[in-house]
Amino acid sequence: MVRLVHYSDIENVFDAPERAARLAGRIRDLSGPDAAVVATGDTTAPGVLSLVATGRQILDFYAATDTLLDTFGNHEFDYGPDPLRGLVDDATATFVSANVRDENGDPFGRDEGVVPWTVRPIDGATVGFVGVTDPATDSLNPMAAELSFDEPVAAARNALAQMHADVAERGDELDYAVVLSHLGAGDGDLARELDVDVVLGGHVHSPRNERVADTLLVRPGVNGESVVEVTLGGAGSAEAGNDDEPPVPTATLHEPDGADPVDGLEAALEERMAAADLDEVVDRVDDPIERTGPVVHGGECRVGNFVADAFRWVLDADVGLSNAGGLRQGDPWVGGVTKADLISLIPFEEPVALASVTGAELRDVLREMAAPDVDFGEDHWWHGHVSNARVVWDADAELILEATVGGEPIDPDARYTVAVSEYLLHSDHEFPTLAQRHRVDEADIQYEVLADYARERGIDPEVEGRIEIRNREAVAGESR
């Protein structure tokens, strides 16, 4: 029986070394001589430990789990192309990427061992793998702006053709073809357009396990909440005794709870973390502040209000705006909140920027909290949090019923300043109305701003009616 053990988007799991060691333990429990461990990006970043180690904490994890293959997610480029090249060169896992090109337009990382496809024997079967990354990565991640990304379906199709030709030249044939994908919503296109058995996905932070056009599509969710076990079948694409009908790949999602942590991994990660000296307590919280996916993407929430307030405070802006996708999920804040906790929430070395927009543009920005052009979220997700503003949104009609700043209706001809993550001025996928032309000032790195605000004003946000979503009874994920 041929199996794949798949993880992806583990991101902040390293901020709790014991949890990372337990996740590795579950992966090792599921692995074996008939299995290969593979990943599909956003495994090196973001996170506190990732920021400290520039993503190299994944090297400990690869070794602990015997990870065979990985592909690039958008966050693999958080520290720039050169640190990533060094990480790839040192990794025990092989990176598979068919559509990422470097600053010169050449395939990224070929000198360091990146391959567009690879064929591996697994329990007597010949399994081929192709890797692709979201082509919007150069927009999603400013550190990848000098790179380019080929259209993924065409790139994967070309890589599959090369792989089949190479295998045939050796007098063999593939038993199974698998795509390692960090496309998110684009996985369906891969299934419909390509002749492959399985698409192992990532990028979207919710689990998936379904068939599209006779192809199995799975993804494990975020932060190690599950590990995917895929059963392909046997060699020859058919089970013994059932040669007429090839087996249909199936997947099971396993939680890491209950697994024994991998010996030595927790200590290795803690040693990397200790070098950062991030234990300063900036404030104390009595009522736990949640930061799960349903909370930050469900509308107004306490942690979103805290960030938007801090952004507005540091630049004395008319409005503070935080994109929900920039708030990383993790354990609730309760008791002493440390600087490491703040970095864990926004682990990006980007400043808070000040944008100047017209009132008409501001209304467009507020509308984009509900309807951004993104392919890494679910349809019902809410994508923004505000300070000194109020928005009433009709989810059925998809329009703003009310929009105010400082309690006054927005004047379409007036100008307003908005404090935001610098990323929003770079990206044209989240809040596309905002652009570099709107920049007028900037402050410190985002997590430093949160720390300064917490020291001066404390951490005690409340839900105040800043965002009201009407006609949304059938939409999931509204819990606060």
Image (cartoon, rainbow, N blue to C red):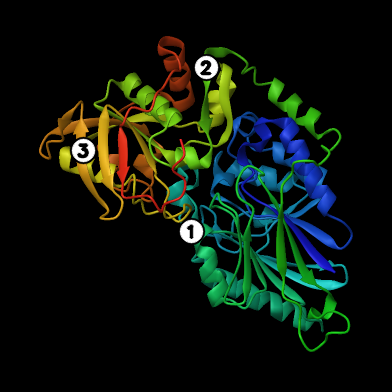
Callout 3 amino acid: Ala
Q: Is mark 1 on a helix, strand or loop?
A: loop
Of circles 1 and 3, the one toward us is 3
Callout 2 amino acid: Val
* Distance from Cα at disc 1 to Cα at disc 3: 34 Å
Who comes first in sequence, dot 2 or dot 1?
1
Residue 352 horizontal/vertical position (percent) = 38, 28
Residue 100 horizontal/vertical position (percent) = 55, 58
> Which circle marks residue 403 in the picture?
3
Q: In which quadrant of the rendered view does residue 424 lie? A: top left
Which residue is more in the foreground, 106 or 32? 32
Q: Name the residue under label 2.
A: 285
Q: Give the residue at the far bottom of this rendering.
A: 244
| Residue at the spot 46% in from the left edge and 39% down from the top edge | 479
- Number of numbered tags placed on the structure image: 3
Q: What element carries label 3?
A: strand
* Distance from Cα at disc 2 to Cα at disc 1: 41 Å
467 shown above or below 446: below
Of circles 2 and 1, the one toward us is 2
Which residue is more in the foreground, 472 or 18? 472
In this rendering, position of residue 305 left or right of residue 46: left
Residue 292 horizontal/vertical position (percent) = 53, 37
Residue 363 horizontal/vertical position (percent) = 21, 42
User: Can the viewer see residue 75 in this picture?
Assistant: yes
> Which circle marks residue 135 in the picture?
1
In this rendering, position of residue 351 left or right of residue 242: left
In this rendering, position of residue 132 left or right of residue 24: left
Q: In which quadrant of the rendered view does residue 302 lie? A: top left
| Residue at the spot 70% in from the left edge and 79% down from the top edge | 164
